[in-house]
Amino acid sequence: MKFEVVAKKALKKYDIKVTNLVYMMEETNVFFHVFTETKEYVLKIFQEESSNYNDNLAEHYFIGVINEKTDILTPQVVENIEGITVTKIPYSNKRGYKRCALYSFLSGEGIYQLEDMDYFEKIGKEIAKMHLATSGLDFPDYVNPKKWKKIFYYEDEIAVYKKKKYSKYITEEMIEILDELIPYIDRKLKFFYEKGEPQLIHADMNPWNIKSKGERFIIYDFEEAMLAYPIHDIAVFMYYYKYSDTFNFYDIKEAFLKGYETILPRPSNLNLKNLELIMMARRINFFNYVLTINPNPKEYLEMSFPRIKEYYLSYR
């Protein structure tokens, strides 16, 4: 496994005695399960297209705030022997190194497709706790989170749907609608930052980043941490249930907000139109991402584009 060498070199930078190293998975990033005689950890090797160094620092700062100011369960970041949380290991890529980070390991059970209405209310409360913890924070100088001011907010990210290599998947109708929707949504996203103070949010509250542990939940993967608004977290969470075959979307929304409002008032800008806007921004971003990473994106595009078109016809 090509990243095992990187993992072993990175672990030498930590004050732990590794007894076993097990490859876990490669998704957006590469993960290894790390064992010592007394503890377990997860080593993450960041992929260049998924984050940059500033993103990693924002993630680690956010996790520290959550661990300090709330009772939410989340993996803790481990500092290396130099007292920093991002370890750079020489590697033959354009930057000449790979970024790695070590986290405590927390076991839990996946929640996706096991949800009930009680879960939606409880997770609304947990997300409100995060929002309360990051409201009004004064960031240290080294924390410079990205902002969700446009659909394609990653470093160097561009729209690819008009590139010739994808022409067999993309129709003229798709191009026409995306050409109109993307600048429209970008203008609307930018407008959020003209109203009120943004704060650090998780920004990727998808069902796979939440696990249950007894009566509690573990929240994972703060890599998307950005300077935005609570409605962005709520919209991303709702995105995954918009077309649910099991639950009514509006029932989920109200259950979630019932739990949320036990901690904080619902955001003043939270309305269906804004939720739909942010959910569509995520859909188009993912539409673009699938084109770039999936060798056969046809099935996903055929499922997703009608939903993009539906939004276009409703909000044009």
Image (cartoon, grey):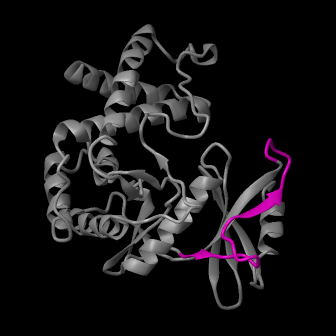
User: Quadrant of residue 103 in the image?
Assistant: bottom right
Give above or below for 213 relative to 186. below
Q: Nearer the viewer, residue 99 or 215?
A: 99
Residue 307, image quadrant: top left
- As for residue 27 lying within the magenta part, the answer is no
Q: Is residue 119 above or below residue 303?
A: below
Answer with left or right where residue 178 lies relative to residue 196.
right
Is residue 74 something one can see in this rendering?
no
Stretch in magenta = 76-95
Label count reads 0
Q: Position of residue 215 (x, y in %)?
A: 30, 80
Look at 62% across and 30% down and name the residue there: 295
Q: Quadrant of the N terminus?
A: bottom right
Classified by dominant secondary structure, the portion drawn in magenta counts as loop
Give how far across and how far down residue 64 sits, in percent. Answer: 50, 74
Q: Residue furthest top?
A: 172
Q: Is residue 78 magenta?
A: yes
246 sits to left or right of 12:
left
Residue in the image at 70% along x and 77% along y: 83
* Residue 17 point in image, percent of width and height: 78, 85
